[in-house]
Image (tube, grey):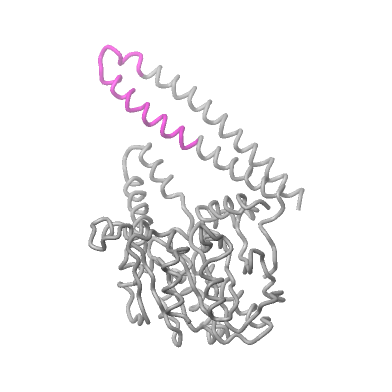
């Protein structure tokens, strides 16, 4: 065992960025699942009411499409941050 | 590196340490043996006050060695006090608390073997003091040391387990049960909540059942030839208060700290400190007095 510490300050911050990137991606995808499944509860109720039934499914599709696009954009941002951090960790020993 | 960054790494390592280690993240805390605030090289320890009596402190989950410091006197704590009383040397272990307990035990055993081989004087009395997960680490290290024929095991005079969840922690067990229930729910948002609660390191999973060995191994006995002591805390001063029965010292219940469900344990002595919570057990002057009474 050596006197190795937790590393240089720059590497530490790349580690934080790496963790933040993965967390952002996972959090965005998790929130997408929560958002869509809770929204489904409402759309299922609308589906059961004769007056709203005709528009329920098109609105659900539109809502889910926009939501997925938004959450996955954030997830992509997280993946980008993660990739940049990984590059920084590899290039600066 | 600033102190707050070490604390942040310790917390990240506690919750995600195995994952961080697998990614070779600089946030993963490396194992270090420390003396007076700095890491020492176990292969060539440069310790001016090296003596044959070592007081070796092992912290718990998400903690650093600073947990042992008295709040009103940060340079003092159980280690320095005992070292002065015994004419010994105080050392502390820093490690990645998110790794499996058995793995940290193996690493600690190897570090102790190297350290004692290279220590400037023969070590005749090694005192191991572990707080919370640190107590489980003592058992894991002693098991690995004995199996590997390590010489340091012969030097161990006393092992002190402070607030260690030998039978598991109610909080970790509770989180495990809640996560399992939520994962079995039909609603996706509940399953996501379950997955979030389940997002924890192997070290925390080991705490839920007090596991100190690899999954397929039998539970080892306490290290023969050494005296074993247990210290536990309780949230309120009235021992019979239901809060104490339910939550113990906040994280560990008193029977778990004593290892009531373990078989064949012979403890030299047990002390309980009502009104002292889990974290405070690591830097409480009353506990220091008890340690001095037992060990000096």
Examine the rendered structure and indicate whether residue B82 appears above or below residue B20: below
Q: Residue A30 in magenta?
A: yes
| Rendering quarter of residue B36 | bottom right
| Rendering quarter of residue B210 | bottom left
**Nearer to me, B20 or A67:** B20
The residue shown at (46%, 80%) is: B295
Residue range highlighted in magenta: A29-56
Residue B27 locus on image (x, y percent)? 62, 52
Main secondary-structure element of the magenta-colored stretch: helix
The residue shown at (45%, 19%) is: A62
| Rendering quarter of residue B194 | top left
Residue sitting at the far top: A51
Q: Is residue B10 left or right of residue B186?
A: right
**Nearer to me, B277 or B139:** B277
Examine the rendered structure and indicate whether residue A77 appears above or below residue B166: above
**Nearer to me, B268 or A49:** B268
Examine the rendered structure and indicate whether residue B146 appears above or below residue B41: below
Residue B136 locus on image (x, y percent)? 45, 69
The residue shown at (46%, 74%) is: B139
Residue B272 locus on image (x, y percent)? 34, 69
How many marks are shown on the rendered structure?
0
Q: Is residue A84 left or right of residue B29?
A: right
Q: Residue B296 in magenta?
A: no
**Nearer to me, B3 or B290:** B290
Residue B250 locus on image (x, y percent)? 36, 56
Residue sitting at the far front: B72
The residue shown at (44%, 64%) is: B284
């Amino acid at each position: 065992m050596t006197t190795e510490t937790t590393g240089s300050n720059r590497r530490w911050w790349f580690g934080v960025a790496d963790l933040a990137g993965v967390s952002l991606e996972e959090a965005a995808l998790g929130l997408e699942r929560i958002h869509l499944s809770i929204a489904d509860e409402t759309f299922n109720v609308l589906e059961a009411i004769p007056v709203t039934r005709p528009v329920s499914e098109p609105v659900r599709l539109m809502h889910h499409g926009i939501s997925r696009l938004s959450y996955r954009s954030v997830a992509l941002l997280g993946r980008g941050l993660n990739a940049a951090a990984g590059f920084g960790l590899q290039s600066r020993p | 590196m600033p102190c707050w960054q070490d604390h942040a790494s310790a917390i990240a390592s506690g919750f995600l340490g195995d994952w961080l280690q697998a990614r070779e993240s600089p946030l993963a805390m490396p194992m270090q043996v420390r003396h007076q605030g700095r890491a020492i090289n176990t292969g060539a320890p440069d310790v001016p006050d090296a003596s044959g009596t070592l007081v070796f402190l092992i912290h718990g989950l998400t903690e650093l060695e600073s947990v042992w410091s008295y709040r009103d006197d940060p340079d003092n704590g159980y280690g320095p006090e005992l070292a002065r009383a015994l004419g010994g040397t105080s050392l502390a272990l820093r490690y990645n608390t998110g790794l499996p307990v058995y793995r940290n035990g193996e690493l600690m055993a190897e570090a102790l073997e190297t350290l004692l081989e290279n220590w400037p004087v023969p070590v005749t009395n090694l005192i191991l003091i572990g707080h919370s997960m640190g107590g489980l680490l003592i058992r894991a290290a002693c098991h690995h040391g004995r199996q590997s024929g390590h010489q340091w095991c012969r030097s161990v005079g006393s092992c002190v387990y402070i607030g260690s969840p030998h039978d598991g922690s109610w909080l970790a067990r509770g989180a495990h049960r809640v996560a399992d229930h939520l994962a079995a729910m039909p609603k996706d948002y509940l399953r996501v909540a379950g997955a979030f609660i389940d997002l924890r390191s192997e070290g925390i999973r080991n705490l839920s059942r007090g596991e100190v060995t690899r999954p397929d191994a039998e539970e080892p006995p306490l290290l023969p030839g050494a005296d074993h002591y247990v210290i536990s805390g309780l949230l309120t001063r009235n021992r019979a208060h239901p809060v104490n029965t339910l939550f113990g010292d906040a994280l560990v219940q008193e029977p778990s700290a004593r290892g009531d469900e373990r078989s064949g344990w012979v403890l030299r002595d047990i002390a309980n400190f009502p009104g002292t919570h889990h974290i405070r057990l690591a830097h409480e002057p009353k506990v220091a007095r008890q340690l001095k009474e037992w060990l000096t």
